[in-house]
Image (cartoon, coloured by chain):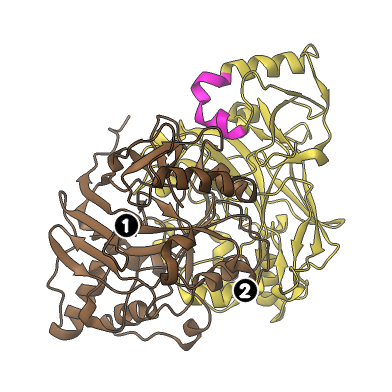
Chain colours: A yellow, B brown
Amino acid sequence: MKLATLKNGRRDGQLLVVSRDLRMAVAVPDIASTMQQVLEEWQAKHRALDEVYRALNAGIATGAFVLDVAQLAAPLPRAYQWADGSAYLVHSELVRKARGAELTPELWHDPLMYQGCGDSLLGARDDVALESTDWGIDLEGEVAVFTDDVPMGVSPQQAKGHIRLIALVNDVSLRGLVPAELAKGFGFFQSKPWTAFSPVAVTPDELGDAWDGQRVHLPLTVHVNEDLLGQPNAGVDMVFDFPQLIAHAAKTRPLGAGTIVGSGTVSNGDRSVGSACLAEKRALETVRDGKPGTPFLTFGDRMTIDMFDRNGNSVFGAISQRVVEYAPPLLA
Amino acid sequence: MKLATLKNGRRDGQLLVVSRDLRMAVAVPDIASTMQQVLEEWQAKHRALDEVYRALNAGIATGAFVLDVAQLAAPLPRAYQWADGSAYLVHSELVRKARGAELTPELWHDPLMYQGCGDSLLGARDDVALESTDWGIDLEGEVAVFTDDVPMGVSPQQAKGHIRLIALVNDVSLRGLVPAELAKGFGFFQSKPWTAFSPVAVTPDELGDAWDGQRVHLPLTVHVNEDLLGQPNAGVDMVFDFPQLIAHAAKTRPLGAGTIVGSGTVSNGDRSVGSACLAEKRALETVRDGKPGTPFLTFGDRMTIDMFDRNGNSVFGAISQRVVEYAPPLLA
C-alpha cells in the first residue's frame, strides 16, 4: 500500500491512497483524514485502506484522480518525534578521517541518533528556503520508517512489528554550522534545518524481498542538478538496522504513533557507487587531494533523491527540490 | 488567562479554561477543543477564551466545575517541537567545575539548546516510570514558553510577540546516561526521557510585573519528597532570555505553532537559594567535599516544582510526580 498527503490548506493535509505506479490517487475521508490518524489507529484502519489500494490498482476505485506530485505535502506533514540515526558508519568514518579524527570503538555498538525538528516537514517538490549559502548547504539522502505506538524498552525483535511505513528523506544540512554546534556538546540544532520526504510512504510489503524486516536492499539514487552524486545501496553497510534504531530511541521512553526514525545518510564502503551527500564527496576529495573540489549547494540548485525497484520503477516517487534564497522578516 | 488540558481518553485531551485561583474550570468546545488548536489560531481565539476566563473568575461561567489537577494532561500533551535551552550558565559552569572542566567563552554568546521528545509529555501528577535507578534519575525545574507560528530568521524583538503562554517544566534527566551520550557528539537522547508540565499554562499578562517580556522574575520552588531542594529566581542569571532562545531556535527554519521553548534548569549564582536539580547539589558537594553526598532519585520519591506570586499564590499549580519502576514488555 502506498499513502500520501495532499496539500489542502490545512496543516495536516488530506490523506490519499496512491496507486502502485504512482499515477492515480484517491482521498479516503471515510476511513481517515490524516496520516497521523492512520498511524494512531493502524490496526483499525489498514485493512480498509488496503481494499481501496487494490481497487485503485485495478482501476475501479471510486473518486480516483490523476496524481500531481507537486501538490503533495510530506506523507506526515508534522511529526511529534523525528529521530534521525547515523547508521552507515562508513560515512561517519570517512567524514572524520577527512578532518584527521577517528571513529571511537563504542560507536560500533551504540547508535548515533539526534532529534530533528518535526514541526514543518517539507513535501517532495517544496523549495528549501535558506538565508545564506555561507552556511554550506548540503543534502542527505536517507531512508526512514514511520511507527505506530512503541512501548518503552522494546527489544529490536519487538520493534520490528511497529514499522508501518517506509519513505525516503532529504535531511538538509548546513555543514558550515556543524562544527561550532557540535563543539558545544548538545548536538545539531541550527545545522539541521529543513527535512523533506518522498511523495509517498509505503508499507513494507511493497518492497517485496528488498525488505528483510530490518533494511531496504535497494540503491538510493541521488542527483545534484543533472549530475549523479551516487547510488549507494541502503541495504549495505547499515550497521544498525531499523529495529535496532527504534529500540535505541525507545530505551527510556515510549515513542508515540507517528514517530519517524531515519537511517542517516546512506553510504557504502564501496566508494565506486558515489555518495548521498556532498560532505562525503568533499571528504573523499580532501583525503585524496588535501582539499575539497566540489562546492556546496547554491541558490537554484536542485537535489533529487529516488529509489527504483528491480524493474526500474520508482518505489516512493522522487524527492526533487530547489534551494532558494530566503529573506528574513524586516526588523520591527 | 490560564489554560489546561483535561484527560478525556483522546491523545490531545480537552482544552479547559481555568480560574485564576486554579479552583474552577470550564471546557470550551465551541471555541477550541485542543491547546494545539488555540496556538494555531491564537488571533482568532484568544479574545473569546479571555471572555470565558473573566466569567469564570467572576463565578458566572456556564458549565464551570471544580478542577481536579490529577485529571490534567500536560497543557500541550504532544508538541511538534520541544526545544530546551540551557540559559542559566551558572548551572553549566558549576556542573563542569565539578568534573574539572571550564565553560568555553563562546557559550556566553551562543545558547546551548537541544531538541527533546515532544510525543509523550506528562501531566503534572503523572508518575515518571523508569526501568532502572542505576541511570541516575534527576529532576530539572524549568520555565518554558509556548509559541504560535514563528517565521524563520526572526529577531529577538520580533520573537517576543510570539510568546503566547508560559508554564513550568520538569525535564527528567538520567545523569548516568549523559556522559556516554554527550561523548558521542550528537547530544542528549536516552538521557532526557520524560518531560512533565505544570497543570496550567498562563498568558504572560497573568504574571503582572514579574514578566518583563523576556524573563519570569519569581522564585521556582523545588522539593524532593518533603525537603526543599531550592528556590532559585527564574529572573536572575538567565543569560539568554526567552526571545533570544526563540530567535536562536528559528535561525534556520520556522517554528510551527505549538512549539515549546524551555529555559533549562533554573540556577542562581547565589548558592544560598539552593538548586532546581540534584546534579547541581551533587556538583556543589563534589567541589566542597570531593564527592557527592546527595543520592539521585529512587522509586517512590516525589518531585515537586511550583512557583508562587508575590501574594503567595501558585501561578501554574504544582508539578508533583512520583518516580516509579517500569517493567519493559517481555521478550517475544
At label 2, counting other C-alpha atoms closer than 10 Å, the crowd grade (few under 14, some 14-19, many 20 or more) is some
Determine whether the residue tagged by mark 2 lies in a helix, strand or loop. helix
* Residue positioned 37% across, 79% down in the render: B236
**Would you place residue A43 above or below residue B106 in this image?**
above
Highlighted magenta segment, given as a residue range:
A35-46
Quick check: do tags 2 and 1 share a chain? yes
Residue A39 drawn in magenta: yes
Residue designated by label 1: B172
On the image, the x and y values in percent for residue A165 come to: 58, 34
B52 vs A252, left or right, is right
The disc, 2 or 1, on the residue closer to the chain's N-terminal end is 2
Residues under labels 2 and 1: Cα distance?
31 Å
Which image quarter is the N terminus of chain A in?
top right
* Residue positioned 18% across, 60% down in the render: B224
At label 1, counting other C-alpha atoms closer than 10 Å, the crowd grade (few under 14, some 14-19, many 20 or more) is many
Looking at numbered disc 2 in the image, what kind of residue is underneath it? Gln
Residue B54 drawn in magenta: no
Q: Choose mark 2 or mark 1, whichever is in front.
A: 2
On the image, the x and y values in percent for residue A53 come to: 69, 19
A261 vs A4, left or right, is left
